[in-house]
Amino acid sequence: MTEDSDKSPKGNNSSTKESPDVDVAPLDEWIKGININSTADVHVPEFLADQVIGQDEAVSVAKKAAKQHRHVMLIGPPGTGKSMIAKAMTDFLPKQELEDILCFPNEKDENEPKIRTVPAGKGEEIVEAHKREARKKEKQKNRGMLMILALIVGAAVVISIWQSNFIIMFFGILAAAMLMIAMRANPRGFGQDSEGQTPKLLKGQDSKKEVPFVDATGAQSGALLGDVKHDPFQSGGLETPPHQRVEVGAIHEAHNGVLFIDEMHMLGMDSQHSLLTAMQEGKFSITGQSERSSGAMVQTEPVPTNFILVAAGNLDSVYGQRDERGVQHGGMHPALRSRIRGYGYEVYVNDTMDDTDENRRKLIRFIAQEIDKDDKKIPHFTKDAIKEMLREAQRRANKRGELTLRLRELGGLVRVAGDLAVERGHKMTTAEDVVNAKSTARSLEQQVTDKFIKKRKEYSMYRTEGDMVGVVNGLAAMGDEQEGMSEYSGIVLPIAAEVTPAHSSDEGKVIATGRLGEIAKEAVQNVSALIKKYTGENISKYDVHIQFIGTQQGVEGDSASISIATAVISALEDIPIDQNVAMTGSLSVRGQVLPVGGITSKIEAAAEVGMDKVLIPKMNEKDIVIEEKYEDKIEIIPVENLGEVLEHALIGEKKEKLLDKLASLLEIKTIPFPTSEPAPKTSNNS
């Protein structure tokens, strides 16, 4: 469970450099003005690059990289079109002659097979020609051996008749039979092994075939770099020739094409270093990848590897992850990244785009593309169904005025809605199908949250009416963009606080329980400074106990900061908190309420359990895109500082006295805060 979701910028939040179209009409009005009746009226572009939505900058870079033979690294959340952009590069690669790769035996050193390249389509012809020549020679040798066998048998018959000793004839026939069996069992020993002299076609393709695109995501070293098969029979003429055991890897298959590797950090450092060598040299020898295999003794001449590398992943793919001691694990080899930067481009892809007329039409085209991609197993979408899909795209963007580009997840909703339409016998997918599909296609986090909420209701782990001292209803979000999900699931997180005399005469302590992560622990410490400021109390003579209730999965993030501060001040001043109010927000050490992530899902969670009010950071107002069914259920109150939080959350006679006390202690005002987007986060829950 995370309290604080991703607060980092969404990369470049627009598919273009232009500002959003502020005059775009609300969806209900806009959908009536488009001149289509369903997605069946939408034209789907032929070229893959034209089907990519919201990634204009990345597509432009990909086109340049293809034409100039540059490498590309695409970084961003899953499901934003990185693999589609990579595939589209093959349409823009300069037309050049494709090649077949052949492996020939080496008479001087059989463990160093020779490599030859020929124009595409010629490799198979060469192999067939060698096979025909080998079969011709084998037939000639067979005739010679048959003549020898006939002479042996004939001589034995003549001698046995001459000597009147038929035992001689028996042994002569027996010798001929044994010789024939030996020839059949070990043709190589008798110079009849056509396989030993025939080259192997390592990579063959039609001369009219498109430029190769090879997806090596998750490939092991042998599949990526090539391998030499193990031979259990290594002597006695039963062994397989080394050149016939050579197998090419993905880097060789992608010669004169595109090699795509997603989640680059999943490759070991040795494989990444070998990949770097192949990129630098344009060729890479094939050898056995297992040191225990007989293939480890074989190393071919260098095999061509003139490919364009498209590496993809999220930020962890570049930097790796750090453990609790700060030691980095995984990530991209520094030299490999340097090679890409020096001879190519690095692009951070968008995960949202501006909510404009043009971009809405692009999403309609996306729905049509998904239907075509599914071989039209699902029916097209009506206008009302399109409107529901666009509304969901707005909601999943987690920011007003934007549309999500996490299109893989949106495509999943398209297919589920289409499946429901088929099940119900609808000729077209309706808005009702889309609405019902939302509950069917819920993420794992949402399903877990539903069960979690049900369990909490059964045990009355939080209250939605009345008041209590030191207990506040905070809000948390489950799910994380770095874990592959764009949609968070909100949950009510009760937090209790108690203030007791310090056990130590030297100083008091802040004791927090609930499996807190590092950021959550730091947030608790920061709150103690604010309590001194807002109460005028010297809390060094108190121990402050803070409990996050029902957090078996752990808590990370700082979005519970205003909840913690409210609970502690309530306990310290003995002022009750309205239990019908939920809240979320981070705090600066000067009392400024800062924005948090997953705000929409948190508000919906509060409304779902029956809360009447929710306090959110003023800066998050523009990020609210809740579903219509929640709009009349809950009052959303934006707050700018801790003083405003206390004003709305506390109740009772002592509340006014505390607020008057605050007014005399400090002037409550909004501290100017930068309006530009914060820097990208470097950890999962910053």
Image (cartoon, rainbow, N blue to C red):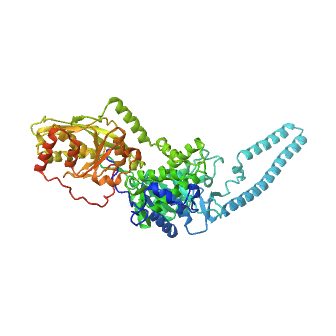
Q: Nearer the viewer, residue 189 or 171?
A: 189
The answer to whether residue 12 of the structure is visible from this angle is yes
Q: Nearer the viewer, residue 374 or 671?
A: 671
Q: Nearer the viewer, residue 351 or 185?
A: 351
Left or right: residue 127 compared with residue 329: right
Question: Measured from the top left, where is residue 599 in percent x and y?
Answer: 34, 48
Question: Measured from the top left, where is residue 18 in percent x and y?
Answer: 40, 67
Left or right: residue 15 compared with residue 463: right
User: Is 523 placed above or below 205 here?
Assistant: above
Left or right: residue 667 compared with residue 68: left
Quarter of the image with the N terminus is top left
User: Is 261 placed above or below 341 here?
Assistant: above
Q: Quadrant of residue 118?
A: bottom right
User: Is 130 placed above or below 325 here?
Assistant: below
Q: How many marks?
A: 0
Question: Measured from the top left, where is residue 194 in percent x and y?
Answer: 71, 54
User: Is 149 placed above or below 23 here?
Assistant: above
Q: Quadrant of residue 255?
A: bottom right
The answer to whether residue 289 of the structure is visible from this angle is no
Q: Nearer the viewer, residue 107 or 507?
A: 507
Residue at point 49%, 42% (across, down): 436
Question: Measured from the top left, where is residue 524 in percent x and y?
Answer: 22, 44
